[in-house]
Image (tube, helix red, strand yellow):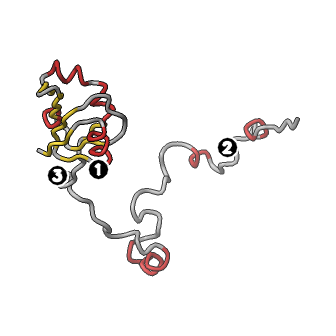
Amino acid sequence: MIRRKKKVRKLRGSHTHGWGCKKKHRGGGSKGGKGMAGTGKRKNTKWTWTIKYAPDHLGKRGFHRPKAVQYTPKTINLSDIDENLQLFLDMGVAYEEEGKIVVDVTQLGVDKVLGTGKLTKPITIKAYYVTPKAEEKIKAAGGEVLLA
């Protein structure tokens, strides 16, 4: 097993532990700064260097879509609908009609029904959008899809 002495042990008795003068390893000075700090006297004196080695350092680039324009649909899986069917009936989100249960997911604030999971009962689902896989599974279980 290698037993190596730590640098701090080797430098015991040394006044500065290899940092030159005491001031260099104390406080918050000489951290480099922000922006073009540390590149020299003035920005324009290092302009040729900036153009060659850091052309993208200055200026803006790209585009961010505003949050108001971005849209992520709220989704629900078929497995969630099947598991919480009794809860939806109690809440009034679902109701029974001609032997089939009708679930209005738009009342839950959901925009889109996804096809993960299985349906154990024939259910009619009202939604703004239903994926093709979900529609296939709903019809296979004996239900139907109503687009709101």
Q: Is residue 30 left or right of residue 58?
A: right
How far is disc 1 from disc 3 in space, using C-alphas?
A: 29 Å
Q: Nearer the viewer, mark 2 or mark 3?
A: 3
Q: How many circles with numbers are drawn on the protein?
A: 3
Task: Report the residue marked by disc 3.
Answer: 68
Q: Amino acid at mark 3?
A: Ala
- Choose the circle earlier in sequence order: 2 or 1: 2
Looking at the rendered structure, the secondary structure element under dot 2 is loop
Looking at the rendered structure, the secondary structure element under dot 3 is loop
Label 2: how many Cα within 10 Å (few below 14, some 14–19, many 20+): some
Q: Amino acid at mark 2?
A: Thr
Q: Amino acid at mark 1?
A: Pro
Decide: is 74 above or below 50. above
**Residue 145: quarter of image:** top left
- Choose the circle earlier in sequence order: 2 or 3: 2
Kindly identify the residue that appears in the image at 26 percent across and 45 percent down. Answer: 135
The numbered disc on residue 132 is 1
Kindly identify the residue that appears in the image at 18 percent across and 28 percent down. Answer: 101
- Choose the circle earlier in sequence order: 1 or 3: 3
> Is the residue under label 1 in contact with that under label 2 (CB below 8 Å)?
no
Q: Position of residue 81 (x, y in %)?
A: 27, 30
Q: Nearer the viewer, mark 1 or mark 3?
A: 1
The numbered disc on residue 57 is none
Kindly identify the residue that appears in the image at 14 percent across and 37 percent down. Answer: 106
- The foreground one among 70 and 19 is 70
Looking at the rendered structure, the secondary structure element under dot 1 is helix
Task: Report the residue marked by disc 2.
Answer: 16
